Amino acid sequence: MQTRSVQPLRALLFDVFGTTVDWRSGVTLAAHEFLGRYGAPGADAGAFADAWRARYQPAMQAVRSGQRAFVRLDVLHRENLLAILPQFGIDPQHVPAPVLDELNLVWHRLDPWPDVIAGLTRLKARYIIAPLSNANVALALNMARRAGLPWDAILGAEVAGAYKPTPESYLRTVEMLALQPAEVSMVAAHNSDLAAAHRCGLQTAFVPRPREHGVGQVSDLRPEQPWDVIAGDFMELADRLGA
Amino acid sequence: MQTRSVQPLRALLFDVFGTTVDWRSGVTLAAHEFLGRYGAPGADAGAFADAWRARYQPAMQAVRSGQRAFVRLDVLHRENLLAILPQFGIDPQHVPAPVLDELNLVWHRLDPWPDVIAGLTRLKARYIIAPLSNANVALALNMARRAGLPWDAILGAEVAGAYKPTPESYLRTVEMLALQPAEVSMVAAHNSDLAAAHRCGLQTAFVPRPREHGVGQVSDLRPEQPWDVIAGDFMELADRLGA
């Protein structure tokens, strides 16, 4: 019987929006309060959250393509927020800037899924744990302080100077841990994130979040490749990884 | 009576070697074991620690001056270790590379001063706390996991891409926190570190560590400028900062 020589796993890097925290519920709640004050009658808060998030990938693509220098996600979120206001009957000029600033920071105040804190706490006892997110440092740090996410470090796009899923975003992060890619696993609810990490030589763990996009979600309901680990939540991930 | 308008303090950035951890005791202990096996009879472990540390600033200066691209501190420590071996009667060729690798990682395994964990835990309840050290990420992270340092993030020279005391090392770190320099205080046992941070607009806190260099220490025994806060240890720092 053949055995495959594998390097021991040392660190786990976590996607944040969708995998670790429930962005849509948090943004929808904040949007509901905001629309109640500034929105057109009947403006839908869930649609607002979806419209805001829909501009996330295109905004980063301008940076990834080199069309624009790296700017942190807080800046992109703020631009995207301004851009969607007219869709919801709001003239940006009619909203005080501090109100928009505060709404923009809702991404710093998202709640983790129910299994996350307990799962991360177990995983941290055995592995280095850090976010590898497109969130900027202040966003991920403020989120961690508020929610009690026990990260060992705040890594990610801003530290790497590159947005996922570019190879640089994964490889520079692994390099900062002074590890080899095969000693590190990406943990994500998104097949595309894991595919990019896999191409860089990282291990992969898929944790589906079937309600990330609400009850009608159709994407990422199941693993699309034979990822190294597939777990229902972070507690099962800890079980599977012996933590 | 005039009052000065000051921005509220939001984050504390800590020097690590000397301020947070007792590098000389830890390195001396590891050097003692190493010299017992590989050193000339009577080779002094404290002198070994001092010789290794003496090459720290010159090695970084090559990077700061632009003579050399940024490399992480683990690499400089390894080169400096090789360079001092002959002074202690050791031919580098006679020591297995894994032994040198392991000795080099002693900088990841240093103990904090006795007041540090309790002081940081109090300070973290009110302020963002992070290292701003010339240590690389893996070094500071491994040290934190071993010692229980409760940092909110691992920042510092490697993340900033610049060694202290360059202005970039302070300003890029503050920028990643999405704060203004005046909202951040540097905490250090070294007047030179605080002077550089002050020139960048940061607040300053001096915590003397009169045994950093052993019993005969002559440097940094007292504040050389009117720093914003002067405290005997991290517990007193917490007192002074209302944490």
Image (spheres, coloured by chain):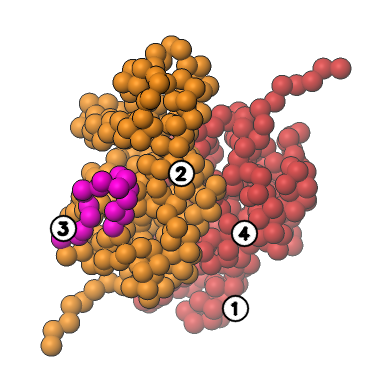
Chain colours: A red, B orange
For disc 3, the marked residue is B224
Mark nearer the N terminus (2 vs 3): 2
Range covered by the magenta-colored residues = B208-225
For disc 2, the marked residue is B110
* Residue A32 on image: x %, y %: 57, 76
The reply, left or right, for residue A72 in relation to residue A140 is left
Same-chain status of marks 2 and 3: yes
Question: Which of B215/A121 is in front?
Answer: B215
> Are the two marked residues, 4 and 3, in contact with CB atoms closer than 8 angstroms?
no
Q: Secondary structure at mark 1?
A: loop
* Residue A67 on image: x %, y %: 37, 39
Instruction: Examine the residues drawn in magenta and state their main secondary structure.
Output: loop
Classify B193 as above or below B238.
above
> Are the two marked residues, 1 and 4, in contact with CB atoms closer than 8 angstroms?
no
Q: Callout 1 environment at 10 Å: few (<14), some (14 to 19), or many (20+)?
A: few
- At a point 44% along the width and 64% down the height, the residue shown is B119
Q: Nearer the viewer, mark 1 or mark 3?
A: 3
* Residue A128 on image: x %, y %: 59, 44
Q: On residue A21, which mark appears?
A: 4
Q: Residue furthest bottom?
A: B1
